[in-house]
């Protein structure tokens, strides 16, 4: 693994850092309080090519490799994880899935809009009763001639009320979920303006408050067979392939949170005086800072390793679980330590570290809880399935 960034990767990182400092950091606290990111950010993300990373230019993408993609998500995560989530889902889970599994017609129908910001995507897998147990989802798609009728509900869907297209996973096989498991699940690209689809935004979240998170309810939503992404009954494969890369996206965002925590804590420690000296001169404060720094570097390298393996065509699913598990837990530790450095000021939302802690906490839950990733890693080590 080459740890030295290329000139192109360095330029992308600098572009993302400048964009974050200019377009995100000054507004992140206000967006958090309002529970809504300014939707104008989508066009701005598209204008600098961040919604088209790794997608071929012939479909409107901006190309680039997966390490460049991680570098961008690190910087966006440093600014506001709610913005990072917009990109991770619309590009990382939806557009990349269309590029990997879509027909030529589907690629030309959806990718130019998704990469230009004219359209936004959401990934509709999680249901009210199936989070970690996604293989037993209950949303159904019933064939009706050359069409499908989709019925069911999805929960905690990022971009849910903003998206123009939902990548929906529904059971098309005849067996009951508890018997069929992952078999018989099919993926569909569903325009969100179709009759029968209701979207309700979820408010009052602990973290990622600016992100549009929603419940989607499908009541005989009719889509043509041409909306099917991949083969019938192979939707679970589409979902797991997307999530394997998506976990790298989450890990990169967690690196960004940890970096923001370190920057804020070091700055505050140099400015805040107690007992006649800056608290940065105190041994236990330096311990807090060094713990953040070590976790940050380890999380960053684990995440970059996933990107490197993807580019080299090597298996990466287990490495992605390792990176997501460590980086998400490290982000929580970093935010806790940063808040401790800030003391009572860290408990006030005038200062950023409270938001970092709230945003970091959800990272250990979605795209696989920490416990699920430990089981995935354990299965890879032993060959024994403990689910």
Image (cartoon, rainbow, N blue to C red):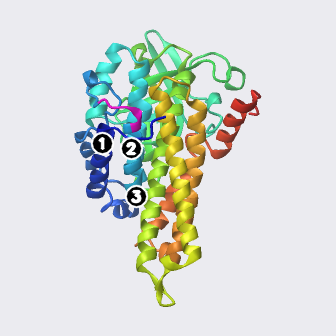
In the figure, residue 42 lies in which quadrant? top left
Magenta part of the protein: which range? 63-67
Looking at the picture, how far across and down is residue 30, in whole percent?
Answer: 34, 64
Asked whether 230 or 317 is in front, the reply is 317
From where the camera sits, is residue 323 visible? yes
For this view, does 15 lie left or right of residue 306? left
Looking at the picture, how far across and down is residue 176, in whole percent?
Answer: 68, 22
For this view, does 177 lie left or right of residue 28? right
First in sequence: mark 3 vs mark 1: 1
Q: Which numbered dot is residue 12?
A: 1
Looking at the picture, how far across and down is residue 236, in whole percent?
Answer: 57, 24
Q: Which numbered dot is residue 71?
A: 2
Q: Are marks 1 and 2 in contact (CB under 8 Å)?
A: yes
Residue at 49% from the left image edge and 47% from the top image edge: 300
Q: Which numbered dot is residue 35?
A: 3
First in sequence: mark 2 vs mark 3: 3
Q: CA distance from mark 1 to mark 2?
A: 8 Å
Q: CA distance from mark 3 to mark 1?
A: 29 Å
- Point out the frontmost of discs 3 and 1: 1
Specify few, some or many for label 1: CA neighbours under 10 Å numbering under 14, 14-19, or 20 or more. Answer: many
Is label 3 in a helix, a strand or a loop?
A: loop
In the figure, residue 381 lies in which quadrant? top right
Asked whether 267 or 30 is in front, the reply is 267
């Amino acid at each position: 693994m080459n740890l030295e960034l290329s000139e192109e990767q360095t330029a992308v990182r600098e572009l993302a850092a400048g964009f974050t400092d200019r377009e995100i950091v000054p507004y992140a606290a206000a967006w958090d309080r309002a529970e809504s990111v300014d939707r104008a950010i989508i066009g701005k993300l598209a204008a600098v090519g961040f919604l088209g990373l790794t997608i071929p230019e012939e479909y409107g993408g901006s190309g680039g490799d997966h390490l460049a993609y991680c570098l961008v998500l690190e910087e966006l995560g440093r600014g506001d994880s709610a913005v990072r989530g917009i990109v991770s889902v619309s590009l990382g889970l939806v557009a990349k899935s269309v590029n990997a599994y879509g027909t030529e017609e589907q690629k030309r129908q959806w990718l130019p809009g998704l990469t230009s910001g004219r359209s936004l995507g959401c990934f509709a897998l999680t249901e009210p009763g199936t989070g970690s147990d996604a293989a037993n989802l209950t949303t159904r798609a019933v064939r009706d001639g050359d069409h499908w009728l989709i019925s069911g509900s999805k929960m905690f869907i990022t971009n849910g009320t903003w998206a123009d297209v939902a990548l929906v996973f529904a059971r098309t096989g005849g067996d009951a979920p508890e018997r069929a498991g992952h078999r018989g699940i099919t993926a569909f690209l569903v325009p969100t303006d179709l009759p029968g689809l209701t979207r309700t935004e979820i408010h009052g979240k602990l973290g990622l408050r600016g992100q549009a998170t929603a419940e989607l309810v499908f009541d005989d939503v009719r889509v043509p067979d041409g909306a099917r992404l991949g083969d019938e009954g192979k939707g679970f494969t589409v979902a797991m392939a997307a999530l394997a890369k998506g976990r790298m996206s989450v890990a990169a965002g967690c690196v960004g949170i940890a970096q923001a925590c370190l920057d804020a804590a070091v700055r505050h420690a140099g400015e805040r005086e107690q007992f006649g000296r800056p608290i940065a001169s105190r041994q236990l404060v330096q311990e807090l800072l060094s713990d953040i720094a070590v976790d940050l570097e380890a999380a960053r390298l684990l995440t970059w390793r996933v990107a490197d393996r993807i580019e080299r065509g090597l298996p990466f699913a287990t490495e992605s679980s390792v990176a997501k598990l460590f980086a998400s837990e490290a982000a929580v530790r970093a935010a806790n330590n940063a808040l401790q450095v800030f003391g009572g000021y860290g408990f006030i939302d005038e200062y950023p570290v409270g938001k970092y802690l709230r945003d970091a906490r959800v990272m250990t839950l979605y795209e696989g809880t920490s416990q699920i990733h430990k089981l995935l890693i354990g299965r890879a080590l032993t060959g024994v399935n403990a689910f």
